[in-house]
Image: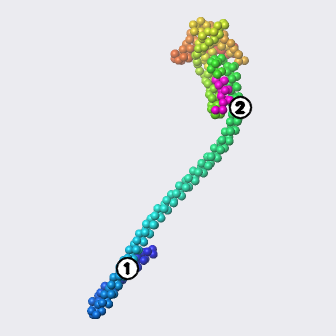
Amino acid sequence: MKLSKLAQASLLLSISTTSLVFSSLSFAEQLPETNSDQLTHVVDAGQQINQSAAKSQQKINRFTDQVQTKLQQFHVVTKEVDGLSVYNQQMQTQLDSQLTELAQLARSMEEVSVIERQISPLMARMISTLDSFVDLDVPFLPSERTKRVEDLKTMMNRADISVSEKFRRVLEAYQIEVDYGRTIEAYSGILPIDGKQMDVDFLRIGRVSLVYQTRDGSRLGEWQQSSKGTGQWQPLSQDYRLGINKALRIARKQLAPDLIMVPVSFNETSTQAE
């Protein structure tokens, strides 16, 4: 506002000076020639005043341009400051959230340590229970199931396997044993029969039936499981031969699922199942 008033004052001064010059010229024309020199000096003085006022106006214009430039720069910097302030608030919010997460992770790590101390004995008991279960169960795939339990026991002593991985493998072994109870399977093996080692085909239907058939089909047998967890192989009649052959083909996916006639062993008794 001060600069504007100064500019207005300069403009008025210039107009006044110009009017004075014209008045002086007009007055000079009316004066005698003897006073013309004095009037010339007056006119020269007025022109000098005009030139000085023009220079002053130019300075004022430059100052005004500089002020406008500085004002624009000020507005730009102010916007940048406002943007940085909002950004800093967002960063502070994120930092607070991260500190909260770090605190939660620290508590979780403490809880994990407690769980690890408690879960190791639990896994040892689970493996021991599984070992006993395999010994008392129907003796199908004995080598494979026994090896699985022994591998779990060896795994428990290894430091390069995490607790979570150990627990996963124990649960996996339990899941495999559970699946045995609802699947049908055929596999080959060696079975001592009348003091001779003979190649036979085993047929397992869940845990309710385990039978064998020699390769030539001349001998059939079933496992009789007692309630005490013991049992023995008992010979089967040739009447089951067609049913067992059909079941073996179904188990090997050589035949579509269909009704089969096989013996079912339960508490030292044998019944027929379709």
> For residue 56, which quarter of the picture?
bottom left
> For residue 230, which quarter of the picture?
top right
> For residue 45, which quarter of the picture?
bottom left
Q: Quick check: is 155 in the magenta stretch?
A: yes
Residue 120's place in the image compared with 186, above or below, is below
The residue under label 2 is which amino acid type? Answer: Pro
Q: CA distance from mark 2 to mark 1?
A: 103 Å
Residue found at x 55% / y 13%: 246
Q: Quadrant of the C terminus?
A: top right
Answer few, some or many: residues within 10 Å of disc 2's Cα (few below 14, many 20 plus, some between 14 and 19): few
Q: How is the image coloured?
A: rainbow
Give the image location of residue 109, x and y in percent.
Answer: 66, 41
Residue 38 visible to an observer of this rendering: yes
The residue under label 1 is which amino acid type? Answer: Ser
Residue designated by label 2 = 121
Give the image location of residue 224, x and y in percent.
Answer: 67, 13
Give the image location of residue 39, x and y in percent.
Answer: 31, 89
Residue farthest to the right, as pictured = 228
Residue designated by label 1 = 52
Q: Quadrant of the N terminus?
A: bottom left
Answer few, some or many: residues within 10 Å of disc 1's Cα (few below 14, many 20 plus, some between 14 and 19): few
**Which residues are drawn in magenta?**
148-160
Residue 220 visible to an observer of this rendering: no
